Image (tube, rainbow, N blue to C red):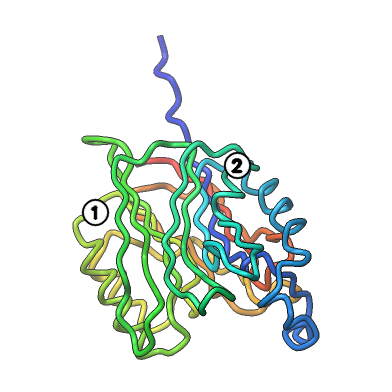
Amino acid sequence: MADAPTPTLRLLSANIQAGSSTRAYRDYVTRSWSHVLPSGKRLNLDSLAELASNYDLVGLQESDPGSLRSGFTNQADYLAERAHFPFWSHQPNRRISRIAGSGNALLSRLQPTDLLDYALPGRIAGRGVLLASFGEGADAWQLAITHLSLGVKSRQLQLGFLAELLADSPRLVLMGDFNCDFDAPEMRALYRGTSLEPPPHRIATFPSWAPQRGLDHVLVGGFKVLDYKAVPAAGSDHMAVGVELLPK
């Protein structure tokens, strides 16, 4: 009898801009109210839930944990319920009083064996990494979700921290909004110190209405990449990144 085929994993990384809708640079000004008010976000979240339902694991960045701008709704919880994910976790990293909050989040159809979160170093606090472990023994692997800083010096510190944190993981996925290209000079420490490799090809993810820059990535080690593509993520100013992986 032939062995059963090894199941693939479908993963999505999405900066959801707290459910806001941005379709042109002028919207940052004309729709600035959306950064403090909840109106219009529910429809975007429902569209995101429909997209997420096609994946096994979803990593979110700029997910609001519950503030005025989200209608005091934990957006990760809402998306997990709408897309029928049995497991979810949220790492709040930045809060502006009760007006706005932001963080990383995980939606998963697989039960994690462990969940940890870490604050990342940087000139301005408010960045972090959410680290989930799955499987046991030879099947064990880790998924890290992060959102790096805008400044090069802060990213250098953060990538050095991540390289040390993830150094001992032979099977690994790191996803998120890196705010730089995958071959930026500061990324070299990550490739040198971990099993992670650059993506199979370059995709543009920002701005979503006319993508020109590759800021969002899914980096893997110990997996074969079967599919790697940019995916529209409702009204967010970032495209999401969808991948299909096969364990090596």
Task: Please give the name of the residue rendered at 51% of the width and 78% of the height, measured from the top-left corner.
Answer: 97
Relative placement, left or right, of 39 versus 192 is right
The image quadrant of residue 3 is top left
* Secondary structure found at label 1: loop
Position in image of residue 37 (x %, y %): 71, 73
Task: Please give the name of the residue rendered at 21% of the width and 62% of the height, measured from the top-left corner.
Answer: 167
**Image quarter hosting the N terminus:** top left
Nearest the camera: 103 or 135? 103
Relative placement, left or right, of 217 versus 172 is right
- Residue 3 vs 211, above or below: the answer is above
* Secondary structure found at label 2: helix
Identify residue for label 1. 169
Packing grade of label 1 (10 A; few <14, some 14-19, many >=20) is: some
Position in image of residue 66 (x %, y %): 56, 62
Nearest the camera: 55 or 62? 62
Nearest the camera: 146 or 30? 30
Q: Is residue 120 visible?
A: yes
Callout 1 touching callout 2 (CB < 8 Å): no
- Which mark, by number, is residue 239? none
The image quadrant of residue 45 is bottom right
Q: Amino acid at mark 1?
A: Ser
Position in image of residue 80 (x %, y %): 57, 45
Identify residue for label 2. 81
